[in-house]
Amino acid sequence: MSSIKKIGILTSGGDAPGMNAAIRAVVRTAIHNDIKVVGIKRGFEGLVNGEFMDMDAGSVSNIMYRGGTVLLTARCSEMMTEEGQKKASQIYKVLGLDALVVIGGDGSLHGAQALIKYGVNVIGIPGTIDLDLDCTDYTIGFDTAVNTGMDAINRIRDTSCSHERCSIVEVMGRNAGFIALWCGITGGAEEVLIPEKSHIDKDAVVKQILENRCQGKTHNLIIVAEGISGSQELANHIESVTGIGTRATILGHLQRGGIPTATDRMHASMMGYYAVKALIDGRFNRVMVYRGGKYDDLDLDEALDYKREYDDTLYEILKILAI
Ligand code: F6P
């Protein structure tokens, strides 16, 4: 018999398309197993302030196709302090929770980790568009963000092509270049600037553009990752040195919203289901991961310590495909 009778669930940090599918999967798997669910609003902020609601199967109807998170989210600075963590763990106890499901990115999983020492049983579900958690091959929201980026690039390409311009498109991703690389390959960019590899070498970019023009390209597309930034300055530099009309577009939060793709809904549904199964089996203080095509749960401390070396393959292929 499982010791789990009541769980809390929250979404924290930047929202990500697919979080709602994960909430739905957690709530319904729990109810199927006679476990009560308490939804905590606004992430850890809601836990610290005791903002919650009881959830039933109906409370997650018609949410899977919606972007964002129905539980709302926040970046909670109080959770960085011992006082905030103690308050959060006290509310957890007052609510009579046996475990807490935390859906979010790196910061949110560190928040969950901080609660373990106060006796909170946690399980994390990776939800961030950035794909910047080394312990897993997938984080919920990434696919939708890349598709949104690719769609925007398609549109920019139309006008860039018509005006024979150079377009700089800056995409989200914090300090990781995955969104940029994927948007670069799927959008047919000739250069991608990512934090893992480079700072902006404006003259190298200019040289590349001039070489490509000499080879017959009539317009150019450069993707800049958020972690590199400086897209407008780069555009100004390219235009002033080459005379080629250059425009910068920063996609920003546009990339974080929207209807989640099937891929995001699928990963979210599976991770939500397996997270509750792990709790029922008594596996606490874990994080759900997708590795080598399989779902698994890893010890949270080990998972957060895990560091993956940057692999240049995608960039190298992008450059070959851009000739
Ligand atoms: O982590 C997701 C993300 O969208 C990053 O790509 C970006 O750097 C950050 O969040 C923006 O955060 P905020 O919405 O708090 O400005």
Image (tube, rainbow, N blue to C red):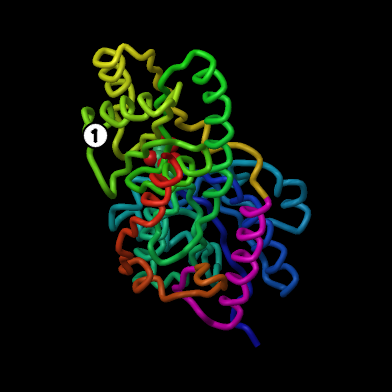
Is residue 54 visible from the viewing direction of this image? no
- The answer to whether residue 188 is above or below residue 264 is above
Where does the C terminus fall, quadrant-wise? top left
Q: Taking 286 as reference, is 260 left or right?
A: right
- Along the viewing direction, whichever of 216 and 256 lies nearer the viewer: 216
Magenta stretch encompasses residue 263:
yes
Report ligand 1 position as a quadrant: top left
The x, y position of residue 130, in whole percent, is 44, 48
Residue visible at 48% across and 32% down in the picture: 253
Residue named by callout 1: 200
Furthest residue toward front = 215
For the question of whether residue 236 can be seen, the reply is yes
- Vertical arrangement, residue 67 with respect to residue 122, above or below: above
Q: Nearer the viewer, residue 121 or 293?
A: 293
Q: Quadrant of residue 218?
A: top left
Q: Is 273 a magenta residue? A: yes
The magenta span reads: 262-287
Q: In the image shown, does 277 or 131 lie closer to the viewer?
A: 131
Could you say where residue 179 lies in the image, as x and y percent from the top left?
Answer: 45, 45
- Total marks shown come to 1
Q: Position of residue 199 (x, y in %)?
A: 22, 39
